[in-house]
């Protein structure tokens, strides 16, 4: 078995048994560069997508079903960004942003994340086919950024106290994004029925303070392994366990064969209408910004 580096392109699960807390740490570097390279977004949107992708990695690595998929979708009514979608399947990440370039240019060099969105909502979908489980929760897009929106998702949608920290930066080595998410496991979550939702969680604030003290530069430090980062924050706890790490990579499910099979299902007259001047049908994958030319006769 090849060793998985705990520095980049990895997610690491953690439990703190005495505090009934579980957590995830994730950092993406080369995989993030690969995802962003195809899109060619302005830096402010690269930053937004980088944070969204590391959040996706944190949430996706919670899935117990290896065939499970996690999707986050931010959608707005009239935002500069009207749609952001990222998903996770088996350690593979992909994502894209749909935006209005003219309004983005008018917003200046450093718009806040939420001035990009305006009014909208964040939907998180956990889809675990092997366990026959699909769950979607939706919350308003509120707060300073995606980390806060994710926290309020867990508070409102699942009544689980959570802390989420995300950071991303670009330097001479490229993009890097890191994140931490810790949650208080309600009693009953492990084996027993949940009898009631406790709103006071006496052991939780302690964990939240320790985890919340993480600095953005620690999250994005490619030379700081995630287990060392966790240890830095939680070394005074009597017991901290790490779970097997999950390797992260750029991935997309689009394939020329699949796209040709979809095209083939259209009636001939509709297919004819899709053919461009070069005699090919071009199908774009928004997720990975790839274009697939399909020969009209093949379809
Ligand atoms: Zn694709």
Image (spheres, grey):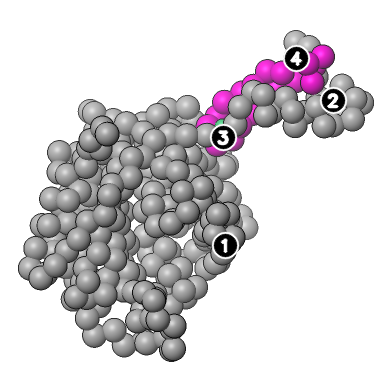
Given residues 78 and 237, the one toward you in this image is 237
Q: Residues within 10 Å of mark 1 (few under 14, many from 20)?
A: few
Q: Confirm whether residue 197 shows in the render.
A: yes
Q: Earlier in the sequence, mark 3 or mark 2?
A: 3
Give the residue displayed 27% in from the left and 34% down from the top.
1
Given residues 81 and 21, the one toward you in this image is 21
Q: Nearer the viewer, mark 3 or mark 1?
A: 1
Region in magenta: 281-299
| Distance (Cα) linking label 4 and label 3 | 21 Å
Contact flag, marks 3 and 2 (Cβ < 8 Å): no
Q: Earlier in the sequence, mark 1 or mark 4?
A: 1
Q: Residue 56 at x, y = what percent?
A: 42, 50
Give the residue displayed 42% in from the left and 63% down from the top.
150
Give the residue number, with chain letter if any, for mark 4: 295
Give the residue displayed 57% in from the left and 49% down from the top.
83
Give the residue number, with chain letter if any, for mark 1: 133
Q: Confirm whether residue 125 shows in the render.
A: no
Q: Nearer the viewer, mark 4 or mark 3?
A: 3
């Amino acid at each position: 078995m090849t060793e998985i580096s705990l520095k980049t392109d990895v997610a690491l699960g953690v439990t703190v048994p005495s505090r009934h807390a579980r957590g995830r740490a994730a950092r993406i570097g080369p995989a993030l560069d690969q995802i962003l390279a195809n899109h060619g977004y302005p830096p402010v949107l690269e930053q937004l997508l980088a944070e969204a992708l590391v959040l996706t990695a944190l949430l996706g690595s919670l899935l117990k079903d290896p065939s499970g998929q996690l999707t986050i979708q931010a959608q707005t009514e009239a935002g500069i960004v009207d749609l952001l979608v990222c998903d996770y399947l088996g350690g593979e990440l992909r994502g894209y942003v749909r935006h209005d370039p003219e309004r983005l240019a008018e917003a200046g060099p450093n718009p806040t994340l939420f001035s990009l969105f305006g009014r909208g909502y964040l939907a998180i979908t956990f889809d675990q086919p092997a366990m026959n489980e699909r769950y979607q929760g939706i919350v308003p897009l509120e707060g300073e950024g995606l980390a806060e929106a994710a926290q309020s998702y867990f508070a409102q949608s699942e009544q689980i106290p959570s802390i989420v920290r995300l950071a991303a930066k670009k330097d001479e080595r490229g993009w890097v994004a890191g994140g931490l998410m810790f949650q208080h496991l309600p009693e009953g979550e492990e084996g027993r029925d949940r009898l009631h939702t406790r709103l006071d969680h006496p052991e939780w604030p302690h964990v939240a303070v320790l985890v919340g003290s993480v600095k953005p530069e620690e999250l994005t430090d490619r030379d700081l392994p995630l287990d060392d980062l966790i240890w830095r924050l939680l070394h005074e706890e009597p017991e901290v366990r790490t779970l097997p790490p999950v390797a992260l990579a750029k991935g997309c499910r689009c394939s020329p064969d699949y796209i040709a099979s979809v095209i083939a299902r259209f009636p001939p007259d509709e297919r004819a209408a899709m053919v461009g001047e070069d005699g090919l049908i071009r199908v774009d994958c928004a997720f990975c910004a790839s274009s697939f030319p399909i020969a009209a006769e093949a379809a």
